[in-house]
Amino acid sequence: MTDMWSERAELYRQSLAHSEGPDLDAIVAWAEGCSSAIDVATGGGHTARRLREAGLEVVSCDPSPGMRPDVICFAEHLPFADGSFDFATTRVAAHHFADIREAVLELARVARQRVAVVDNLFMGEDTELAERLRDPSHVRNYGEREWRTMLADAGLKIVRVETWDYPISFSAWLERCGCEGDEADEVRRLMGSRVDGDEVTLARIGLFAEKVR
Ligand SMILES: C[S@@+](CC[C@H](N)C(=O)[O-])C[C@H]1O[C@@H](n2cnc3c(N)ncnc32)[C@H](O)[C@@H]1O
């Protein structure tokens, strides 16, 4: 699994769908007042970069060496003591985690003050099929209610939830996962009206929480 990500690393570093967006701005805003942060599943490193630009001391982690994280590890087992960072975040990656509940517990455990989770929002079973066809490493997108339960179960108090429509290039989205030919046609069909020409509109959800225990 991790070798596949390493092969894709450069595409993720260059991806406009990852390097900018209102969700990144919202994460940075929620980190205000924090001095240290961990960016879990850093991928192309965009969240870590933005937090560093905002003045935080950041440790990035990811299991894929090609992503060049500071620490190589899975979200489900973060090799840090409880409360090691003021702020813990993961962006547009949780839908790949094998054990999402364990990962959320880990984020809450290593955070001292605040947590921000941003991921693609569940948009229906056809979209899930399309996501898995495009990228077999896709596990699942979650809906707002599922996210709220997971964060509450991890002892986090949700202060704000935001959702965003995310129009991105359909061809670049397929290319990042090497999806082409009949499979690409089937992905287009399953995504229905969310694809318009070379634009696909995904949705993201952001949950901004405080540590309460
Ligand atoms: C789409 S990229 C992340 C994007 C990045 N966070 C950003 O904001 O641009 C997904 C990343 O999740 C990582 N990943 C996959 N499974 C993981 C797991 N169980 N724990 C931590 N990271 C994982 C992959 O190695 C990959 O780098």
Image: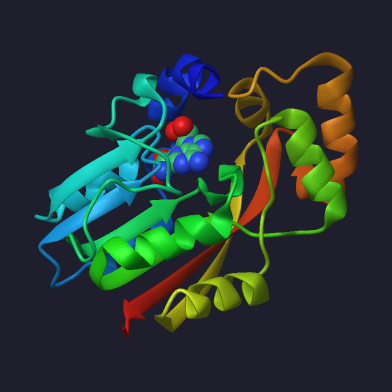
Where 97 sits versus 144, above or below? above
Is residue 26 shown to the viewer in this render?
Answer: no
Please state the horizontal and vertical placement of residue 98, each as a whole percent of the image.
Answer: 60, 44
Is residue 68 shown to the viewer in this render?
Answer: yes
Please state the horizontal and vertical placement of residue 169, each as a whole percent of the image.
Answer: 62, 34
Where 110 sits versus 76, above or below? below
In this figure, which colouring scheme has been used for the structure?
A: rainbow
What residue appears at the point 50 percent right and 80 percent down from the top-left corner?
A: 152
What residue appears at the point 44 percent right and 51 percent down from the top-left corner?
A: 91
Q: Which of the two residues, 149 or 21, is positioned nearer the viewer here?
A: 149
Where 50 sits versus 164, above or below? above
Please state the horizontal and vertical placement of residue 149, each as a whole percent of the image.
Answer: 59, 77
What residue appears at the point 19 percent right and 60 percent down from the top-left corner?
A: 85
What residue appears at the point 36 percent right and 37 percent down from the top-left corner?
A: 73
Please state the horizontal and vertical placement of residue 203, each as a whole percent of the image.
Answer: 63, 57
In this rendering, position of residue 148 left or right of residue 26: right
Total number of numbered labels? 0
Question: Where is the N terminus found, in terms of image quarters?
Answer: top right
Question: Where is the C terminus found, in terms of image quarters?
Answer: bottom left
In this rendering, position of residue 16 left or right of residue 205: left
Where 110 sits versus 202, above or below? below
